[in-house]
């Protein structure tokens, strides 16, 4: 137990964060909101890796190393996605998914 908090409570919060991210990804129409939802999903997986590693293998760091890799990939993904969103906004002056779908080449 970490500071009086059980693994079930931490995994419940992580599950809640994951499903809020999935809901946001499936229902949002703004590309930036969708990007934030993907970040929530990735952060929930980071929490799971860290907590499960702490409870199952407290002397090993594999879960923490996976968490650092996920955070690095999420940062790179965010930087790339923001660059794409900025270019799309310059092109069509909107970041709504419906406007991007109707864009012709």
Image (cartoon, rainbow, N blue to C red):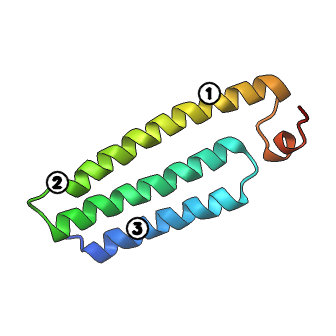
| Residue sticking out furthest to the top | 90
Q: Which residue is mark 2?
A: 61
Q: Disc 1 vs disc 3: which is toward the camera?
A: 1
Number of residues whose C-alpha sits closer than 10 Å to that of mark 1, classed few (under 14), some (14–19) or many (20 or more)? few
Q: Which residue is mark 1?
A: 83
Q: CA distance from mark 1 to mark 3?
A: 31 Å
Decide if residue 100 is on the left or right side of residue 41: right
- Residue at the image position 35 percent from the left and 71 percent from the top: 11
| Residue sticking out furthest to the front | 105
Q: Which residue is mark 3?
A: 13
Q: Is residue 53 above or below residue 82?
A: below
User: Residue 46 at what x, y percent from top left?
Assistant: 36, 55
Q: Quadrant of residue 75?
A: top left
**Mark toward the start of the polypeptide (1 vs 2):** 2
Decide if residue 68 is on the left or right side of residue 92: left
Q: Quadrant of residue 90?
A: top right
Q: Secondary structure at mark 3?
A: helix
User: Residue 96 at what x, y percent from top left?
Assistant: 79, 42
Q: Is residue 92 above or below residue 49?
A: above
Report if residue 3 is visible in the image: no
- Residue at the image position 34 percent from the left and 63 percent from the top: 48
Q: CA distance from mark 3 to mark 2?
A: 22 Å
- Identify which residue, 74 or 93, lies in the foreground: 74
- Residue at the image position 91 percent from the left and 35 percent from the top: 104
């Amino acid at each position: 137990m970490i500071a009086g908090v059980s693994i079930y409570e931490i995994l419940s919060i992580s599950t809640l964060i994951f499903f809020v991210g999935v809901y946001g990804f499936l229902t949002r129409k703004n590309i930036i909101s969708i990007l934030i939802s993907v970040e929530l999903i990735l952060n929930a997986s980071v929490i799971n890796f860290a907590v499960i590693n702490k409870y199952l293998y407290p002397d090993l760091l594999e879960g923490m190393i996976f968490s650092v890799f996920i955070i690095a990939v999420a940062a790179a993904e965010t930087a790339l996605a923001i660059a794409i969103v900025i270019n799309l906004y310059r092109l069509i002056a909107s970041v709504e998914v419906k406007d991007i779908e109707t864009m012709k080449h």
